[in-house]
Amino acid sequence: MATIHCLGTGLVGSYVVRYLSERGHLIHAYDLDPSRVEGLRNVNVHRVDQNFSVEDISSAEGSLALNMLPGAIGSVWTRALGERFPTIIDLSFSEITPNASFLEADKIGTRILWDVGIAPGLSNMLASYAVRKMGNLSSLKIYVGGNPTEPIGEWKYMAPFSPTDVLEEYTRPARILRNGLLDVVPAITDRHIIEVPGYGRMEGFLTDGLRSLIETLPCSDMYEYTVRWPG
């Protein structure tokens, strides 16, 4: 059984807390409104306010920290957690990525595992698997999108994670690779229609989801497209 400190109990965080608690781990859950995880077995709920800091966490020795906060504050908390916890799992979708230059991890012995969601996360694993099977890639295009099964309502969409992070997908410039070089382009560019088996016509556009793949995957051209119902 591990002791795990979970920051954020929203749509994603509450699912992770429930999953880990059901497998016997001791969870400390922190949120402004932790009602989604109250009453769960093995979960100690900590209702915090805007003055909450990493120093308010009682003990980090031998513990694991999961950062599941919205991207707007995710990088700040990853850095703060890195000063106290030996291992951090970072699920926040922050514009600032916790790569080697983010934290002097070697000096303080902190390990940070980031981009571990569905995309980025599972998509990274599939890309890595492709390299192991086929060798260095010349081109990689990742299409990802959690969408309603039917285009209902004006937005034709329902946010499966932090709404502020959903908006970031439409506003944050997208980092891509062209001819092996990093390029930054406006979000929602290269819009095009794709055919999705069983669902029909959907729309893809560039978003900033490559992140760690840019530095770790041997590939000349690399793009990530978010997929939505047209319009």
Image: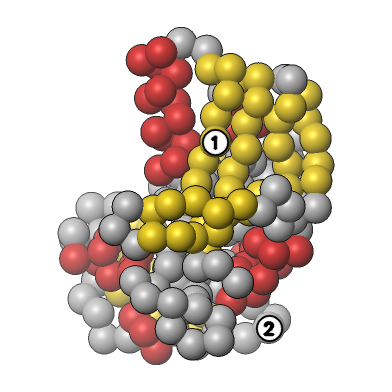
- Residue 171 image point, x, y percent: 75, 64
Amino acid of disc 1: Lys
- Horizontal side of residue 143 vs 76, given as left or right: left
> Can the viewer see residue 67?
no
Where on the picture, by quarter, is residue 111? top right
Where on the picture, by quarter, is residue 26? bottom left
Looking at the rendered structure, which numbered label has been put on residue 107?
none
Looking at the rendered structure, which numbered label has been put on residue 50?
2
Q: How is the image coloured?
A: secondary structure
Residue that label 1 marks = 141
Marks 1 and 2, the one that precedes in the sequence: 2
- Horizontal side of residue 125 vs 216, given as left or right: left
Q: Considering the image in quadrants, where does the C terminus appear? A: bottom right
Q: Which residue: 59% across, 76% down?
A: 163
Amino acid of disc 2: Gln
- Residue 97 image point, x, y percent: 68, 45
Q: Which residue: 18% across, 59% down?
A: 23
Mark 2: secondary structure: loop
Mark 1: secondary structure: strand
Few, some or many C-alpha atoms within 10 Å of disc 2 (few <14, some 14-19, many ≥20)? few
- Residue 179 image point, x, y percent: 74, 20
Few, some or many C-alpha atoms within 10 Å of disc 1 (few <14, some 14-19, many ≥20)? few
Q: Which residue: 58% across, 32% down?
A: 213
Q: Is residue 189 above or below residue 128?
A: below
Question: Disc 1 versus disc 2: distance between alpha carbons?
Answer: 40 Å
Q: Which residue: 32% across, 52% down?
A: 197
- Horizontal side of residue 18 vs 146, given as left or right: left
Seen from the viewer's position, the closer of residues 111 and 58 is 111
Seen from the viewer's position, the closer of residues 209 and 198 is 198
